[in-house]
Image (cartoon, rainbow, N blue to C red):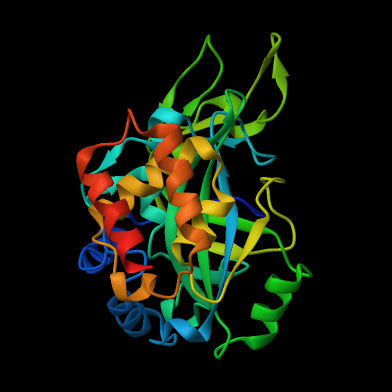
Amino acid sequence: MAFWITASIPIKQLGDFNSFRRKAETLKVVNGSNLLDETIFEKMAALYAVSPNPQDYRYLSALAVRANVPNSNGDAVSREELFRYRPLRRCRSFETFIHSPLHVNHFSSNPKLARGFIVDAIYNTWDEDFEFVETVVAVDKTKDPILADALVSGKINKFSMGSIVESLQCSLSFCKKVAHKQSELCEHLRSQKMQYINGELCFEWNIGVDYEELSVVDNPAEKMAMTRKVLGNIPKLRNVLNYLPPAQREGFAIAASERHISWGELMGLDKSDIEIIDEYVRLYGNKIPPSVLVVLKKIKEAI
């Protein structure tokens, strides 16, 4: 058994990890694919009954999960856990968001009810006290035009993750009990979450996390889980680089090289994008792997 956790109210119910394992197998064909590859939209259309046309989506970036601090439900995930390799999904924990569905209020039992999907997930660090997973969300404006318009206008801007967690650990230094099912929870997590006990805040560390979906909600447990920026009609390189802090651009370039960027998509860029690329090379030239330099050279040639 495993824990099914959402970052909105109510928080939790027991889930069947075996059923999720079967679903994870179906996702293997799309994990690790190209941010800009149109074939991904065809695969997502089959999974979630959304449009196969990238032009039918609105794109935005949203904070999905904060690291190292509990949300108001008393759930927390560490940076180390977010970077833990998940063998069934063949990626790191935070990357299990990629190609997961976008739902409303965690009505996620039927994947065909999805309003879109997660195009990409990036680990961001503003400072040592604020680390988070940022997602690039694609909302199908032909399937739910009201929701798409509301997200773009900012009338709706709150999100909540849904995840499968293998185990929970009590945060209290004098306890630290690990539970794999509800009956194994310590007395602190049963009745004293988000209370101070002997000067320590009691919450649960999530261990073995696979992110199953992201939902639009009214009352997220993570109050910072909100829209960060509307990216435009198609998430071209310029849109993504503009919303990333400079220190994170190298990570995107590495991801782009691993995912074999579709140069046809990049042909829509203009000359101003060369300045962004040149700035990136100037700032990080001594740290850029040769493979990434090749990617950047191809981008400039495609403009």
Does residue 38 lie above or below 185 as drawn? below
Q: Does the rendering let one see residue 291?
A: yes
Q: In the image, is residue 129 above or below residue 74?
A: above
* Placement of 221 over or under 218, stated as above or below: above
Say whether residue 162 is left or right of residue 42.
right
Tell me which corner region of the image, top left, top right, bottom left or bottom right, holds residue 46.
bottom left
Q: Which residue is rendered at x = 27% and y = 39% of the image? A: 85
Q: Residue furthest right?
A: 155
Q: Is residue 1 visible?
A: no
From the image, which quarter does the C terminus lie in?
A: bottom left
The number of discs equals 0
Q: Which residue is at a point 27% across and 63% down the rendered structure image? A: 33
Tell me if residue 223 comes above or below residue 70 in the rendering: below
User: Is 32 on the left or on the right of 113, as rendered?
Assistant: left
Question: Observer-nearest residue: 5 or 251?
Answer: 251
* Relative image position of residue 63 (x, y in whole percent): 59, 50
Residue at the spot 50% in from the left edge and 52% down from the top edge: 275
Q: Position of residue 115 (x, y in %)?
A: 53, 78
* Coordinates of residue 37 in the picture (x, y in percent): 31, 72
Most foreground residue, 73 or 159: 159
The percent coordinates of residue 227 (x first, y second) are: 66, 58
**Residue nearest the viewer, comparing 213 with 236:** 236
